[in-house]
Image (cartoon, rainbow, N blue to C red):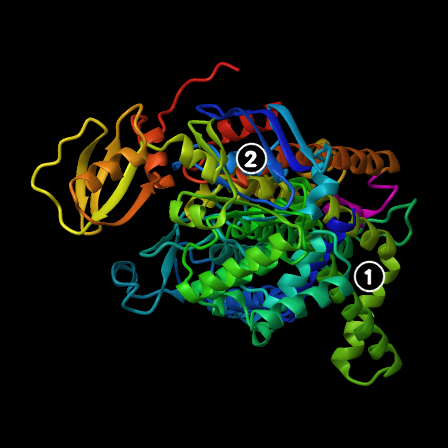
Amino acid sequence: MNILEVRNLKKYFATQKAVDDISLEIPQGSIFGLLGPNGAGKTTLIRMITGIFYPDSGEIILKGKPFDPENDARFIGYMPEERGLYKKMKIGEQALYLARLKGLSRQDAMVKIKDWFARLEMDSWWNKKVEDLSKGMGQKLQFVITVLHEPDLIILDEPFSGLDPVNSNLIKDEIYRLAKKGSTIIFSTHRMEQVEEICDQIVLVNKGKKILDGSVQQIKQEFKENLYGIQLEHVPDTIQSQAFEVIGQNKEGLIVRIAEGFKPNDVLGYFMQQGININSFKEILPSLNDIFIKLVEGTPTARQFQTISA
Amino acid sequence: MNKILLIIQREFLTRVRKRTFIISTIMFPLLYLGLIFGTGYIADKTREDLKIALIDHSGLFSEKLVQLVNGNDSSNTLKLISENTEKTMLSFDSMGYDGYVVIPQNFDWKTGTDSLMVNTKKSFGMGAINPVERKVNQIWNKIKHDSLGLDIAKETILNKTVSLKLKNQKDKNANVVIATTIGYVCGFLMYIILLLYGSQVMMGVTEEKTSRIAEVVVSSVKPFQLMVGKIIGIGMVALAQFLIWIACIFIIYNIGKTSGAGGGNMSEMVGHIQNVFTSVNLPLVVGCFIFYLLAGFFFYSSLYAAIGSAINEDMREAQSLSFPITMLIIFSIALMTPTISNPSSPVAVWASIIPFSSPIVMMARIPFGVPNTVPWWQLGLSMVSLIIGFMFTTWFAARIYRTGILMYGKKPSWKEMIKWAFRK
């Protein structure tokens, strides 16, 4: 079942088609990566999903029903890229206030805050103010506030920026834990190594349009270039074969591209015939980073302003 | 609805619990009184004691008469100079005079002269010169009386004057002095509350925008709810402050009354308050004040909220954008003086009905009496139009707000903001 479906969503601003006909489906319980270069329209898309903006056209279906921002707010937890909290308000009160704004009762909110604060070792923060926190601590607090009301859909915009590796891992573990408990997580970022590590599925947007959609494995397969890494006992001076060509060498060994119509066995056969021992042989799949750069390359790095007649 | 209540609660509590609220609640009346008495005191202290040389060529002015009038009023001193007149005219300042007046030789006791010149080396205001003029005329009056052969008894008869006092037949208790005072106090209080709390709304909105909490909150509530919650919350703070002041006046009054003729000052103050109670319909004034305070506050603060949402961290942007709004409030207070001097004039009537100026101007009129000075229809029309006014400004502001609160970068102009408001 899909927790969220977005159909033909459009949002045009005076000088930009921020989101231009995007459709996507997010299965319940998945960790979903929303990728795209700066200014691709990610934030605008998220703002529509969280009910901050109204779409110009298109539909948002949350849990099988048309999205109703006012009543569905409690199903969604959103952590914006630009973190924001009341600087002068006490942390405990602030968490309580924001949880109640999401629709939790006072008692419920208290229990949950106490629970989260205890787990992330934040008990001593209750009477402190946000301005007393370091950037990383603030980040942690922001995360807790986002997921406090146990939303079904959690949207995190660059959740790890500004976190040290220890706290990063802490948050990552919490994300896994939440996903295991049934929450769906949308993860907006341009840090590809994190996406590869965490996400099941991704969507890549650029210039307001969706240009890629699928599971991480599937996409990698789709973009593979028949590259293999082979480690040999010793590298012969000349390698001549119809089956493959050597396109590079690193400390692991040779990188070869298998020609059309040939199989990995042909590569192995060639070296075996020459009596060279093979230490290892593996397929090299492109990293998401490579795919991302390849797809986005050629489009101007900064989005140009355009005139919209809508 | 529940969420708006939460927002109101937060805005109210965070402000009321601040030390600045307590301090301002106590300090404001003290400062206000200090201002009134302080300026009076300073004006009294800095009054110029003029010393004027009177050079008499006519021979009518005598030392005796000059002494007599100097004795009546010590705020300035006249000195009759009969010798060394040339020297006095040349170097009066080094002789300790602020100026000199020459009575010409042809000065006749019957006709006198149109005007005389006070020659000085500094500039003096009318406030300083008028008493001198009065003295010179007193001397001349004496000369006239003596020349006409009037004795003291006849002179006293001639000097008798009558003063006019206003008595409103419909409103037996009307007291112009008290009404004027209450009118001024209400108008100024309204002015200060609108400006002070209006800018608090503006700064609060800007703070939410620049600290980026707005985006977190509007993913839970509608921007409209956030804006209205903030405005109502801060409005409640203003109301609470006002009610504390009213309560204090009642407490002082009651303590004073029960302690009877304890201290002289205390009973005097109680007497003043008693006067106010009997001559002004206090419940009506307080009730109207609360209405105009809240309605006027909603009218202006929603506009301030719209500006707060449009600006970024730079406070100069706030100043330039809020200038037109602030001007409206200042214009209203400028209309208050003519209103109080004639509360039934067309200017006063219209300014108290048109929404933007009505909170201040109507509050200056109401102490003069409802329904005699302010007919019921005017009060009703004024209230209805203010309600319509603030509903419009809130609608208008909300449309700017929802765009502005998430818009970073360049400061928009008023023209752009109006475009946001009327976009579908």
**Viewer-side residue, A114 vs B173:** A114
Residue A250 vs B13, above or below: the answer is above
Q: Which amino acid does the dot numbered 1 rest on?
A: Val
Per the rendered image, the range of residues in magenta is: B360-374
Q: Is residue B338 visible?
A: no
Measure the alpha-carbon separation of dots 1 and 2: 49 Å
Q: Position of residue A49 (x, y in %)?
A: 61, 37
Of circles 1 and 2, the one toward us is 2
Q: Position of residue B54 (x, y in %)?
A: 40, 60
Query: Which residue is identified by label 2?
Result: B403
Query: Which residue is identified by label 1?
Result: B276
Residue B42 vs A67, above or below: the answer is below
Q: In the rendered image, which quarter is residue B149 located in?
A: bottom right
Q: Which mark is residue B287?
A: none
Name the residue rendered at 18%, 35% in the picture. A247
Most distant residue in the top direction: A309
